[in-house]
Structure formats: structure tokens, C-alpha cells
């Protein structure tokens, strides 16, 4: 499934709506309240409907609930799920009746407007709560208790709607200053909803028709296809009628996210994949799933609560995992009850079914009550837009992030970085931004390697089809910054192929708002020539930086999307790929992401504090007295005859090869200390390699059986498996070739610094002459083996020669005796000799 379809389904799940409905009342309240959600006539929405309806009843939500069902005439004729929820049928707007535009998300505002105009129930309501189908209600949602007022609806925060801050809002509303970035949970007074709903629909049509402003830098939609037009239609419609929201970022949570301390979410929105250990769930994998109508079939059971207690020690993270369990178990409980309702046979007993019917599960899913922190509102969006200059805290909170893909190549790098992070004393948490296609994610084994935020893969650009995996880095940061709420003031951005040696803190390296810290990338000559003049209005501000980035969260929010946009822009500018513009000796545009970073920073007027004391490449001579905080092993490095090149392990599934390690570097005690610079250089190289192996062993101790407890090994496997690519005796040696779409040069270019021509030449010579020679064991081993082989061959030759000589002597001895002996002896021997001897005697 493509990333475009991923976003499409995520939006469609929040849309649509449709005929007369019955009322189901789950509780009572002092005001008349009604809950709405919109769907289409599809299996995909049917199982979501079952989950939402079941949770609605369990939560004790007061008032009736109505499903706004949108179907074409043909779909309605074949639809089987009319009894899944109280339903009000609305005309389908998926294919616009006037423009012919296919945009199913418009059914949400269209369905609400139709219900207000044609439903009798809408005439007897004070408050309306609007939800999406892919939600689980955990407790009563009472607008008046949430703080909603007439003229001040309550909504959840959708920070990625940057169109509220730019020309898009100015074009589509007379009051852009009132534009609120909100969505998800909506709690309205009925009078406000009546005024607002027609404008919501109208503004959605306007934004959808405005193709000239669909681009990423205007909407924040990284696909630039207008799929979030309905969300902007909501914000612009509310601004147009003068509605200012009370914005709450605590009431709703995505499963997989860690709730803030003291906050009890009363709504779960499972719009994104989430996991618990090796178990995972993604709603998009069940788009055509008829599970509602298949008796006895449920979604795969997740781990049990007692297993989660053993899995996670941190109380708040463990609470997040419990939310994941609660979400899927509530859906499965709803499916089970729905099957019983429709006459399915009682399913066979199982441990999981017993758990769903247990007192323990009932207690875990009892209605939740709002806490004081859950009710805390964010500031008005107008105030959020202002840069509030506050005194720098002496020790601001930090969050570290890094970007990877769903490949074994990044898995062992992830282990190295995360292990070193835990050893380094770095403040705050670390998060892996994992970019995967849907197909990759289904087969991916490394979900447990690091705290992870999943992002859609942009390796193959959804619009242009361009293959450029490096764009995943800015795209992942954009996705993370818009989907994860963090209280960190500074974000540290690293690459996966790094090892941390110590903390990287903004206060030590003098980072500040408007002054990010980074490390020098002097080869980015495009900052000095025509390339910068073409791609930024402020070429004089272009800094040659990259690698490690320390940036204030406020700067990152403004900068991240521009980084992605500039990367796309530079990548598309093929006319300026030549070396004379970029410094890229391969002239293939592979460092477009690096220029995207520098040009975007210049565009945002960010001037970097450039530090030479943070990062070093193993194999480089360190500056005297500098305590480097990060190894970046992007290039091959050597110590004597030993070497390490990360590219050689591109296709080796190291993380799943128990107790395997990279070839050990020489012992530090064997180094030549006559040259201090070379000695210090080699010490750092050895430290980097040993850190990677330590990370692997630490991971294997958690995952793999104790090698000492294994059965006695065979002669061929006396030691744990080795990743060393050695002699012909090694069984099935891996093929370490770069992918067809990437050359070795392209890989190297992404990480080169300094004397790139020299590095490229040495790598090409190495790969042409002997692809695996740098990974071979020391020469003494081969010589010893060769020497023993020669001795064995000599011994065999001597034995064979001796045998021939002995046989020759015996044969001639016998022939001599026959000539000298008497006749009767010859006759006596002829009695038992062969035919040949008898013939000889007769002759």
C-alpha cells in the first residue's frame, strides 16, 4: 500500500455519513447530549463501528449515538451492516455531484449538515459530540464538564495544520487570526453547530478546489494532494463564523503514545499502528476485513497485562502499553458480543476468551474519570503563534531522535546508538523515527530495538516516483513534530550510524532559540555559489553544517517542514547536480537532503553555532585535549591490518544472528605508541568498534539463550557464529553487494567529509580487487593454515611413494624365485595361482 493511500485511508476513516435513526441512551445527564460519527458502507468501517459502539456503552456516555452512513445506491443494495448502530443515512458526496471530484472525506461535514437539517433528533439536543469511527471511548465525554461554552467549543489539538499561519488562511477566511489548529474530538453547543456546519462544508469545497495551494509548504500535507482539505474546511469555517476553541491536548491519545503524568485520556484514536513487544496492530491492514461477519474470528490477541508488567519497568511507559491492550481488547470484546447477537455458535474455550470475560478485564476497562490535568486547556492558538521570550532554564529538557528504515542494515546501527545513548549519560529520552512501507512493516522483526515512532516511507516519492531514501530524515522529523507532543525544550537529532561517548547538551554547547548547534560539513560548497542563490533568499546565511543538530523546539517547529520542502526542491534541480555546484563527486543529487537542511535554516534565519568538539569520524586524528561526544562511523577506518566498513554489512541481518559480533579490532596494548597522533587515532577507532560489539552482546543477553546452556556443539560449530567473512570453510558466506538502485559511491556520498576523492579511490580499489579482504582475519591465521596443509600433502605423498616402492620390490622378488626354483615347485604353485600362471607353466 502506498503512502498516499495510507494518508487517504487515515482521512477516509474520519469522514462520511446517512436515513432515520433509533436512539441508544447509555446514560443520563442534566443536558440533552447527542454523539455523532460518520462512516461509509464498507467492511473497514463496520468493525470500527462495532468497537466504537461497544466502548460507548461501556463508558457510560449519556444520550443517544447516531452513525451517519454514506452509501451510493449500489453500495446500499448490498450492504449487510444496517443493525450495527443507530443509523441516519445521508447522500454520498464521495464523488462530488457538481465537480466530479473524488474526495470521500467531504462526507463528514456533508453528513453533519444533512443530519441537522433532516433529523428530528437534532431538534431536541443541547450539546453534540462528534467523533471518528476509529476511536474507543474510555469515559463520559460531557461538553459542559470539559469547559465547552456556547461560542467556545472544545476540540483536540492538530498542530500540523500550518495553513492557519500562512497565505492559505488569508485566502479562505476573513478572520485568519481566529484560525485554530484543531480536530479529532469536537464538542459543540447545538446553536453553534447549526451556524457552523454549512460553512464547514462550503470551506471544505473551497480548499479542495484550490489546487494552487495544495503544496506541502502551504498546507503541511507532505503529499501535497489536498487530502486534508476537510480539516482546513473545519478550521476556516469556524474562524469565518467567529468560533474560538478551547483546545485540549490531554483528552485524546493515540495508542502507542505515552500519556503525560497525571493525565487520564478518555478517548483513544487508533489512526496509527501501535505495538506491544512483538505484537502489533494497524487498522489499515484490515481495510477489506469481513471480521464482523465471520463467526468466532477476532483480531490477533495481544500480550496479557502480567506480561507487560515484566516487559516494562517505567510506570508511565507501562501505562501506555496497557492503553494499547485496552484498545484492541475492547474491539475484540465488541466483536465477540456482536457475533453472539447474530446467532453465531458459542466459540470454543480459550485462555484469551476467558480473559475477555474475566473480572480483571472488566476492572481494567471500567469507565475512566477526568483528572485535573486532563482538563487543562492549551493557550489560545493566537497566543501559541507568538514567540514568547523567556529566560533560558539552566537545564532544559532534551529529547534525542534519529531516523532509520525497516532494514537489517539500520537495525544493528540502532542497537549501537541506543546502547551508547544509555551509557552516555545523555539527559531525556531517545526515539527512533522508523520509516517503512506497509509491506516492509508486515515483515519487519526489529520493533523492539528502540522506542519507536512509525512514519510513512518517503523513499519512493509518492508524487514524483523519485527513489531517494535520504528524504526520510526530514520527512520523519516533520511527522514526529506534528504527531508527538513533547515537553522537551531542545531536540538533538543524530544519524543511526553514530556512537555516543558522552552527553550532548544545549547549555554546554551554547545552543539558544534562533541559534542551533551543529558540526562542520565543509564540503558543502553549494553554500558559496549559485546553488545557494537559487534555493534561498538568504544565501549569506547558509551554514555548511550537518551530522549532529541541537535545536530549540520552537525553531524546529518552524524549520522542519521547510527542511523537507527544500530537500525536494534541491533534489528536483538536476541542472545543479554537477560537482562544481554541489561538491558531490558522483553528481547524482545524493546530498540534496544536506543542502535542504542548510538552505532551510538560512530561509528561517537560523545561524548555527558550529562546534568542532562534538563529532569525530573513526580513523581521523583527534585534536589534542578534545573530548568528542559522538563517533560517526560513516567511512571505512583501519587499525593496522584490521578494518571496518559499515557498507560491507548492508545486507546482513546482524540483530537476529544470536551471539554474533563484528571482527574484533586489535588489542590496544599491541599498538605502536611512537607517534602520539596515530596512537590516539587508533585508540578511538578501537573504542568505536568495541562499542558496537558491546551493544550486540547486551541485546543478545536479552533476546538469545545463554550460549553456555546450549547442547554440546558439533565439530563444525564449536564457537558462537561469527560475522567475519573468512575462508572457504565458512558456510554460506553472505553476499555483501549494494542494492541495484544504489551504487557504493552513492552510499559513500551521503556520509563523506574532507578528502572525498581519496576516500572514494581507496574504496573502489578495495572493492575491485577483493570485496571482502578488509574483513578477513589477520594474515598469520591464513599462513598457519597454509603451512599445515603443505605438511599434510607432503606426508600423503611420502606415504604413497613408500607404498609403491614396497609393492615393486615384492613383485620382482617373486618373479626371481620362479626363475631359480625346481619344476615341482612351479607345479605346486600352479594349483592355486590364476589362469595367467598356469598358462605360463605350460609354456
Image (spheres, rainbow, N blue to C red):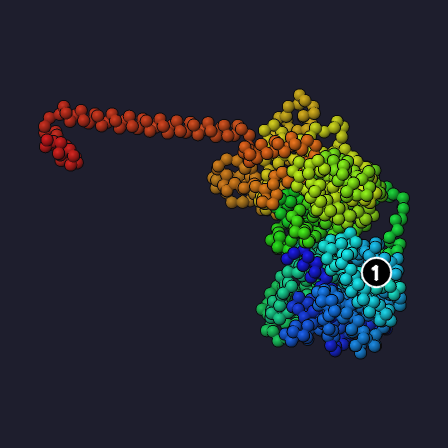
Q: Nearer the viewer, residue 563 or 347?
A: 563
Residue count near mark 1 (Cα–Cα under 10 Å), binned few <14, some 14–19, many ≥20: many
Q: In this rendering, would 159 be left or right of 448?
A: right
Expressed as whole percent of the image width and height from the top left, the position of residue 201 reads 79, 67
Which residue does the image show at 66% across and 21% down from the upper left? 674
Which residue does the image show at 73% across and 70% down from the upper left? 97
Q: Quadrant of the C terminus?
A: top left
Q: Nearer the viewer, residue 554 or 373?
A: 554
- Furthest-front residue in this view: 575
In the image, is residue 190 above or below residue 486? Answer: below
The quadrant holding residue 644 is top right
In the image, is residue 74 above or below residue 768? Answer: below
Q: Nearer the viewer, residue 525 or 141?
A: 525
Any part of residue 553 in sight: no
In the image, is residue 806 above or below residue 175? Answer: above
Mark 1 residue element: helix
Expressed as whole percent of the image width and height from the top left, the position of residue 288 reads 63, 65
Expressed as whole percent of the image width and height from the top left, the position of residue 805 reads 28, 25
Q: Quadrant of the N terminus?
A: bottom right
Which residue does the image show at 77% across and 43% down from the upper left? 535
Q: Dot 1 corresponds to which residue?
A: 172
Q: In this rendering, would 329 be left or right of 33?
A: left
Which residue does the image show at 86% across and 52% down from the upper left? 385
Amino acid at each position: 500500500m502506498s503512502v498516499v493511500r495510507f494518508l487517504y485511508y487515515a482521512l477516509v476513516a474520519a469522514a462520511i455519513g446517512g436515513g432515520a435513526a433509533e436512539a441508544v441512551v447509555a446514560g443520563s445527564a442534566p443536558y440533552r447530549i447527542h454523539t455523532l460519527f460518520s462512516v461509509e458502507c464498507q467492511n473497514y468501517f463496520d468493525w470500527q463501528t462495532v468497537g466504537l459502539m461497544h466502548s460507548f456503552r461501556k463508558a457510560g456516555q449519556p444520550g443517544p449515538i447516531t452513525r451517519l452512513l454514506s452509501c451510493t445506491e449500489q453500495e446500499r443494495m448490498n450492504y449487510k451492516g444496517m443493525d450495527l448502530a443507530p443509523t441516519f443515512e445521508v447522500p454520498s458526496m464521495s464523488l462530488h455531484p457538481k465537480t466530479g471530484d473524488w474526495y470521500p472525506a467531504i462526507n463528514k461535514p456533508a453528513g453533519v449538515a444533512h443530519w441537522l437539517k433532516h433529523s428530528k433528533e437534532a431538534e431536541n439536543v443541547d450539546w453534540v459530540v462528534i467523533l471518528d469511527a476509529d476511536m474507543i471511548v474510555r469515559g463520559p465525554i460531557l461538553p459542559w464538564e470539559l469547559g465547552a461554552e456556547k461560542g467556545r467549543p472544545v476540540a483536540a489539538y492538530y498542530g500540523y495544520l500550518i495553513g492557519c499561519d500562512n497565505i492559505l488562511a488569508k485566502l479562505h477566511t476573513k478572520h485568519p487570526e481566529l484560525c485554530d489548529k484543531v480536530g479529532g474530538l469536537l464538542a459543540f453547543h447545538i446553536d453553534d453547530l447549526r451556524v457552523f456546519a454549512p460553512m464547514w462544508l462550503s470551506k471544505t469545497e473551497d480548499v479542495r478546489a484550490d489546487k494552487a495551494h495544495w503544496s506541502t509548504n502551504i498546507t503541511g500535507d507532505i503529499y501535497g494532494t489536498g487530502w486534508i482539505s476537510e480539516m482546513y474546511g473545519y478550521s476556516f469555517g469556524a474562524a469565518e463564523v467567529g468560533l474560538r476553541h478551547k483546545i485540549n491536548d490531554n483528552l485524546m491519545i493515540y495508542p502507542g503514545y505515552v500519556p503525560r503524568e497525571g493525565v487520564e485520556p478518555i478517548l483513544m484514536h487508533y489512526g496509527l499502528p501501535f505495538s506491544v513487544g512483538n505484537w502489533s496492530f494497524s487498522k489499515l491492514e484490515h481495510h477489506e476485513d469481513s471480521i464482523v461477519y465471520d463467526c468466532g474470528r477476532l483480531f490477533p490477541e495481544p500480550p496479557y497485562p502480567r506480561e507487560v508488567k515484566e516487559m516494562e519497568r517505567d510506570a508511565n511507559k507501562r501505562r501506555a502499553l496497557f492503553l494499547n491492550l485496552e484498545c484492541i481488547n475492547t474491539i475484540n470484546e465488541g466483536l465477540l458480543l456482536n457475533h453472539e447477537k447474530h446467532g453465531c455458535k458459542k466459540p470454543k474455550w480459550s485462555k484469551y476468551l476467558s480473559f475477555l470475560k474475566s473480572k480483571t478485564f472488566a476492572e481494567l476497562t471500567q469507565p475512566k474519570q477526568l483528572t485535573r490535568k486532563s482538563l487543562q486547556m492549551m493557550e489560545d492558538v493566537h497566543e501559541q503563534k507568538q514567540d514568547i521570550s523567556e529566560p533560558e532554564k539552566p537545564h532544559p529538557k532534551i529529547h534525542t531522535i534519529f531516523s532509520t528504515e525497516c532494514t537489517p542494515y539500520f537495525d544493528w546501527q540502532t542497537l549501537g546508538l541506543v546502547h551508547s545513548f544509555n551509557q552516555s549519560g545523555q539527559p531525556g529520552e531517545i526515539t527512533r523515527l522508523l520509516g517503512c512501507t506497509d509491506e516492509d512493516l508486515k515483515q519487519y522483526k526489529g520493533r523492539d530495538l528502540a522506542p519507536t515512532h512509525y512514519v510513512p516511507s518517503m523513499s519512493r516519492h509518492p508524487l514524483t516516483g523519485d527513489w531517494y531514501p535520504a528524504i526520510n530524515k526530514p520527512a520523519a522529523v516533520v511527522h514526529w513534530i506534528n504527531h508527538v507532543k513533547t515537553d522537551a525544550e531542545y531536540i538533538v537529532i543524530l544519524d543511526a550510524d553514530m556512537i555516543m561517548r558522552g552527553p550532548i547538551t544545549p547549555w554546554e554547547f551554547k545552543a539558544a532559540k534562533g541559534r542551533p548547534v551543529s558540526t562542520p560539513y565543509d564540503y558543502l560548497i553549494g553554500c558559496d555559489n549559485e546553488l545557494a542563490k537559487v534555493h534561498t533568499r538568504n544565501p549569506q546565511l547558509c551554514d555548511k553544517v550537518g551530522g549532529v543538530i541541537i535545536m530549540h523546539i520552537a525553531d524546529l517547529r518552524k524549520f522542519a517542514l521547510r527542511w523537507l520542502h527544500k530537500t525536494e526542491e534541491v533534489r528536483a534541480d538536476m541542472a545543479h547536480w554537477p560537482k562544481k555546484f554541489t561538491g558531490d563527486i558522483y553528481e547524482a543529487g545524493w546530498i540534496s537532503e544536506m543542502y535542504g537542511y542548510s538552505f532551510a535554516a538560512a530561509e528561517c534565519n537560523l545561524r548555527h553555532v558550529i562546534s568542532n568538539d562534538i563529532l569525530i569520524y573513526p580513523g581521523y586524528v583527534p585534536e589534542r585535549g578534545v573530548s568528542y561526544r559522538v563517533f560517526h562511523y560513516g567511512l571505512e577506518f583501519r587499525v593496522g591490518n584490521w578494518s571496518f566498513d559499515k557498507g560491507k554489512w548492508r545486507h546482513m541481518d546482524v540483530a537476529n544472528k544470536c551471539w554474533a559480533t563484528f571482527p574484533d579490532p586489535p588489542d590496544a596494548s599491541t599498538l605502536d605508541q611512537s607517534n602520539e597522533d596515530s596512537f590516539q587515532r587508533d585508540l578511538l577507532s578501537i573504542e568505536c568498534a568495541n562499542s558496537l560489539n558491546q551493544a550486540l552482546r547486551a541485546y543478545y543477553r536479552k533476546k538469545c539463550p545463554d550460549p553456555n546452556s546450549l547442547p554440546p556443539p558439533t565439530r563444525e560449530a564449536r564457537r558462537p557464529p561469527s560475522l567475519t567473512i573468512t575462508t572457504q570453510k565458512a558456510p554460506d558466506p553472505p553476499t555483501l553487494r549494494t542494492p541495484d538502485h544504489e551504487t557504493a559511491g552513492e552510499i559513500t556520498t551521503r556520509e563523506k567529509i574532507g578528502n572525498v576523492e581519496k576516500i572514494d579511490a581507496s574504496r573502489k580499489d578495495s572493492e575491485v580487487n577483493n570485496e571482502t579482504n578488509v574483513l578477513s582475519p589477520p594474515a598469520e591465521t591464513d599462513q598457519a593454515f597454509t603451512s599445515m596443509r603443505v605438511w599434510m600433502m607432503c606426508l600423503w605423498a611420502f606415504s604413497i611413494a613408500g607404498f609403491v616402492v614396497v609393492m615393486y620390490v615384492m613383485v620382482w622378488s617373486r618373479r626371481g624365485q620362479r626363475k631359480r626354483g625346481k619344476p615341482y615347485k612351479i607345479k605346486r604353485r600352479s594349483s592355486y595361482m590364476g589362469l595367467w600362471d598356469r598358462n605360463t607353466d605350460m609354456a
